[in-house]
Image: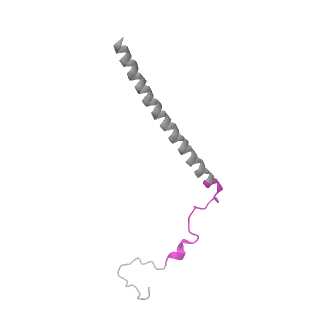
Amino acid sequence: MMANDKILESLSEKMDSFNSAMKNQLSFNKILGTQLAKLVAVVLSSKQGKIPGKPKDPIEGIRLVNTRFTNTWPKSV
């Protein structure tokens, strides 16, 4: 009888541990689902064909492109 009690206690501890792990997983899944829903809302509300945060004219920030190392830089730059 004592051996059965130890087996039942061990099973109970394992089930409690499993139950705790499942609750943690469900909580994580809920958080992940919320974040995914927010991301979907942002994507659907943004203009199609545009990348959020993309500069209007990426060339406006370029002043000089030098592809050769033999050229000297002008002093005015």
Residue at coordinates 55% horizontally, 41% vertically from top-left?
Answer: 30
Q: Is residue 75 above or below residue 41?
A: below
Q: Position of residue 32 (x, y in %)?
A: 53, 45
Q: Is residue 37 left or right of residue 13?
A: right
Above or below, comparing residue 15 to residue 33 in the picture: above
Quarter in which the C terminus is drawn: bottom left
User: What residue is at 56 percent from the left and 65 percent from the top?
Assistant: 54
Between residues 69 and 16, which one lies in front from this camera angle? 16
Q: Is residue 2 above or below residue 71?
A: above
Please give the name of the residue rendered at 48% of the width and 37% of the height, measured from the top-left corner. 24
Does residue 38 belong to the magenta stretch? Answer: no
Q: Nearer the viewer, residue 17 or 65?
A: 17
The stretch in magenta equals 42-62
Q: Is residue 2 left or right of residue 77?
A: left
Main SS, magenta region, reads loop
Identity of the residue furthest to the bottom in this view: 75
Q: Position of residue 35 (x, y in %)?
A: 56, 48
Residue plotted at (41% across, 88% down): 75
In the image: residue 9, left or right of residue 29: left
Measured from the top left, where is residue 45 in percent x and y? 65, 56
Q: Quadrant of residue 56?
A: bottom right
Colouring style: one colour
Image quarter in which the N terminus is found: top left
Q: Nearer the viewer, residue 67 or 6?
A: 6
Q: How many marks?
A: 0
Q: Percent x, y for residue 44?
A: 64, 53
Residue at the extreme top: 1
Q: Is residue 11 left or right of residue 23?
A: left
Rendered view: 49 above or below 69: above
Front position in the image: 48 or 38: 38
